[in-house]
Structures are given as C-alpha cells and as structure tokens.
Amino acid sequence: MRTRKDLEELEDKILAVYAMKSKDSAGREHDEPQHDGRTCYQRDRDRVVHSEAFRKLEYKTQVFVIFEGDYYRTRLTHTIEVAQLARTIGRNLRLNEDLIEAIALAHDLGHPPFGHAGEEALDEIVSKGSGKGFNHNLRSFEIVTQFEKKYPNFNGLNLTREVLVGILKHETIYDTPGGAVYRKFKEGPGLEAQVVDIADSLAYLNHDIDDGITSGCINEEDLMESSLWQKAVKKIGVDAKRAQPQIFKYQIVKELIDMQVKDLLTSTDERLKKLAFKSSHEVKLHKESVVGFSTQMALERDALQNMLNEKLYHHWRVERMTTKARRIVKDLFDVYIKNPKQLPYTIYPRQVKFTDAQKHELIGNYIASMTDRFALDEHKRLFDPYQKV
C-alpha cells in the first residue's frame, strides 16, 4: 500500500523539474496535520468535490439555460470537461495532475446563475451600491476561503496556496483576475494553473459549437467561415460527413479539439525548452504565460471565437435568454434591497446593522449563490401572487 511519502517520492521521479511537487507546497493558511495516504493537492481536490458550491454547478447555465433542454452543458459538465482536458495536457507536459484537477474543479465555483448574463447584471447592480462590483474569480476565492463552512476552527476549505492562486488568477477572455486580493499574491500562477486557463478556453470554444449546432443557433454554413473548421472537415474525411448528423458533429468537434491540443503541446514544449526552467519557483517568477498556442493557431481560434460571438452568443434565442436572465437578477435584487427582511435569517441576521454598501454586497453574494432553477423559483414566489411563499 502506498503512503503519502511514497506518492511524493513518485512525483520526484516522474514529474518535470518545472512541475509543482506536493512536498514543496507553500501550505495552507491554517496548519493541519498531513494525511497518511493522500498528498495535499489530492485533499484539495476532494474538498472541492464535496463542497456545496460544487454541487450547485449542476443547475447553473453555461450558454443555454436549463429549461432549454437536458442535452446542453451546465457549469458542472463544463467543469468536468475542463478538468479532463487539463489533466490530459498536464500529463503530456509532466505536470502535477492532482494540482491541475483541484484548480480545474474549483475554477467556476463563483459563477452566479444564468452564466455571463447573470454575472454582468450582478456586477452592474452591486458596483452602484458598494463600489466593488462582482468578479466570479474573486467570488470563487471567497467561497473556498470564507463561505464554505465545514470545519470547527476556521471558515472555508483551507486549500493550499497554489490552488488559491490558480483560482484567483484564472484568466481567459471571459475571466479576469480578482481585484485587490489578487495583488496580495505576488507570485504568478504555475504551469498547472496556466494549463487550467487554456483548458477552460478549449472547452468552452469547442463545446459551445456542439451545443450551438444542437440548438440550431449556428449551422455548418456559418462555421465554414472558419479556416479551423474547414481543416477539421477535411481531416475527418468524406465518410464522416456522409454519416448521420449527430456522428458528423461529434467527429468534427473531436477533431477540432485534437488539432488544438496537439498545437498547444508542441508550442508549449518549444517554449519550455527555450526557457529551461529549473524549478516551479522560476515559473512563478516568469512574467509571461508559457502555456499557449502557436501564432497561427491563436489567429484561427480568434477568428472562430469571433464568429461564435456574432452568430451564437448574439443569436435572437440566446439574446432572449440573456435579457430574461438579467431581468430576473435585477428584479430579485430590487425586491431584496427594498426590504432585506425578506431574506433568510442566515443571510441577513436581524441583530446586525448593515450599511447600504454592505447590504448591496450581501444581497449580491446571496443571488450569486443561487442556481438557475432556484432563482427562477424565487422570482415566481416573489412576483407571482398565486405562488406559495
């Protein structure tokens, strides 16, 4: 039977010199005894999986709200796909897969209901009252450091510093690092965190195509504008194109991902050889991201992303969903701020005197914690006179 020390020794043997080793972790804010059979990052992963916020991802929007159908991806299925892609990339680069998985599974914990529409609505509302705005990376960080309450001596999950940095400094075209707290962590993200960032962008670009085709909001004619799509069609061959639409769609999305991952691994490996890092600490001090695509692939991905922005994310059906989502979030906020005593006692303790700014922040956090389904039900309870309270 392997012990934790055995696993740590195994990491020394199989991981690259620039990978983050469990035994070299900067540790946790609150000291805890080490586990006999699991590394620190394995424990982090398990704590995230068993958190309330992780379970709620099942009923939070990716692009299509849950009432649109059972097929479409949710935040939970997206998160699992990100973890799978990130581990595959990390394994090939000889990085710490347990650290990668812990960051990947936690990276979207702070998302509010209704995807980016919900986040934008909350940011606009909360910033007017508190001046802080809403950032889901910061919210994810606050969930794992404050709001999850499972231990008697401290709030949060007490994750390792490396996972916290990976959550807080997560960055894609939709994700910006989290505010003032971000600056307290002076080190940059390690390669494991960079892999999660790129896996996130890979997952949503390619799987949004899948969902977009299924919904009918985009079609093959739209996608043929993309040179990357054209290459994928050519690679899968005529037989796949003659197959049933479902098979063709699966094969082409698979090919798109494969092309991008191969380019990513080749380009990143070349950079790593040039930089010749001798430790994970050197990676953290390096100012620029190392994990990335070739210049040509980056351009082709940008063109495909721009096409999706125009044809999918602004399709009239998606616009209706996002407009409705914004309205629901605003309605909920307005009714709570007018009379906060409608909030549960655990959310709004009656014995505490809150400033207006604190009320805005408190209500924003409460709405952010909702699933799509709960927010819809709550909206009915508050605005439909025939609904039970």
Image (cartoon, rainbow, N blue to C red):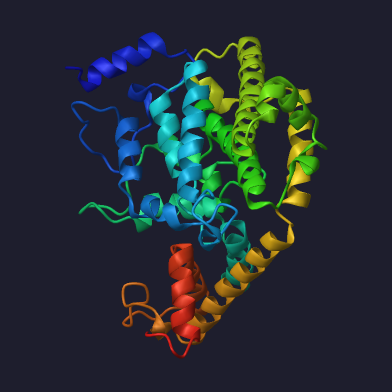
Q: For the point 24% across and 18% down, which residue is it? A: 5
Q: Is residue 389 left or right of residue 225?
A: left
Residue 327 picture location, percent across and down? 61, 74
The answer to whether residue 303 is above or below residue 314 is above
Q: Give the quadrant of residue 20.
A: top left
Residue 101 picture location, percent across and down? 42, 33
| Nearest the eye: 77 or 220 | 220
| Nearest the eye: 331 or 34 | 331
The answer to whether residue 62 is above or below residue 160 is below
Residue found at the far bottom of this picture: 385
Q: Is residue 298 left or right of residue 349?
A: right
Q: Give the quadrant of residue 118.
A: bottom right
Viewer can see residue 174: no
Q: For the point 30% across and 13% down, which residue is it? A: 9
| Nearest the eye: 388 or 178 | 388
Q: Give the quadrant of residue 59.
A: bottom left
Residue 318 picture location, percent across and down? 67, 60
Q: Is residue 79 left or right of residue 262?
A: left
The C terminus is located in which quarter? bottom left
The answer to whether residue 96 is above or below residue 304 is above
**Number of marks in the image?**
0
Q: For the point 61% across and 24% down, which residue is it? A: 258
The N terminus is located in which quarter? top left
Residue 188 picture location, percent across and down? 55, 33
Q: Is residue 254 left or right of residue 143?
A: right
